[in-house]
Amino acid sequence: MEILNLKKKLTKNILYRKYVIEKKSLPEIKNEYNLKSCTNIYKLLKLYGINSRSVKEACNNPQTIRKREKTSLKKYGYRSNFQSPKTKITIRKKYGVSNIFQVKEIVKSNMLKIRKINEKNGKWVPLDQISNFEKYKRKVESKTRKNYNKYFYKIKNAKKRSREWHLDHIVSKYYGFKNNIAPEIIGHYKNLRIVHHSINESKGFKCPKNAKMLIKEISGEI
């Protein structure tokens, strides 16, 4: 109900203008509309097919940079706290360098934090599962190619497939891998659809609510 009310205020054109053209962040849009969290705005982005920013893009967003610099100026008197002489002395004493990003351990630690967040959100495959997942994925892709060609006319919007419109597995390959589902099921033509690239890219490893029903239906055919 909450998202339906928000949809009336925050139409596709308005959200596109604020997020893409004006480059406002989700927290800024949230504050503008007096919302409790950014969750529903993120849902609208996916619903409207508007690509959400990556972590790198968000960090390099001019408005985010200006806000970060303003906070740092107020707190440290410098555009970045790393420019503060006090911070530089502390870093040099502790690590022997003036630039914190020269310390491999710090960079590695930050990368591990990013990986943990993405694994938790289901966007990245855990490192210890990559090799087995790759093997599983290859089997699924082999079945997918065969079924896509064989049942081309049974797959909705198959003719649309292009750089903009992607072939998508309704029940994702990673979900299949995690739940020990046979590659034949994930690569089955009934599990294939053509969707806009923005939907496919923002989907991650999420699956629809009817995933179990679809798996059961396909299982009865193979």
Image (spheres, helix red, strand yellow):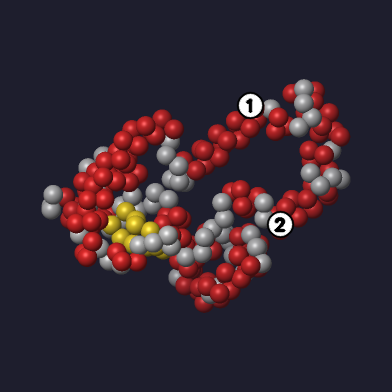
At horizontal 70% and vertical 33% (from top left) the residue drawn is 101
Q: Are marks 1 and 2 in contact (CB under 8 Å)?
A: no
What's the distance in space between the residues labelled 1 and 2, CA to CA? 29 Å
Q: Secondary structure at mark 1?
A: helix
Q: Position of residue 48 (x, y in %)?
A: 48, 68
Relative to 201, is 182 above or below? above
Residue 74 is situated, as x and y percent measured from the top left of the image, at 83, 49
Q: Which mark is residue 53?
A: none
Residue placed farthest to the left in the image? Answer: 221
Residue 102 is situated, as x and y percent measured from the top left of the image, at 71, 29
Amino acid carrying label 1: it is: Glu
Q: Is residue 40 left or right of residue 184?
A: right
Is residue 104 toward the left or the right of residue 148 in the image?
right
Instruction: Indicate the amino acid at tag 2.
Output: Pro
User: Is 185 left, or right, of 55 in this rendering?
Assistant: left
Q: Which secondary structure, mark 2?
A: helix
Q: Residues within 10 Å of mark 2 (few under 14, many from 20)?
A: few
Instruction: Identify the residue at horizontal 86%, vertical 34% (top origin).
Output: 85
Q: Which mark is residue 105?
A: 1
Find residue 62 and name its label: 2
Q: Is residue 92 left or right of residue 105?
A: right
Which residue occupies 23% across, 61% down?
Answer: 152
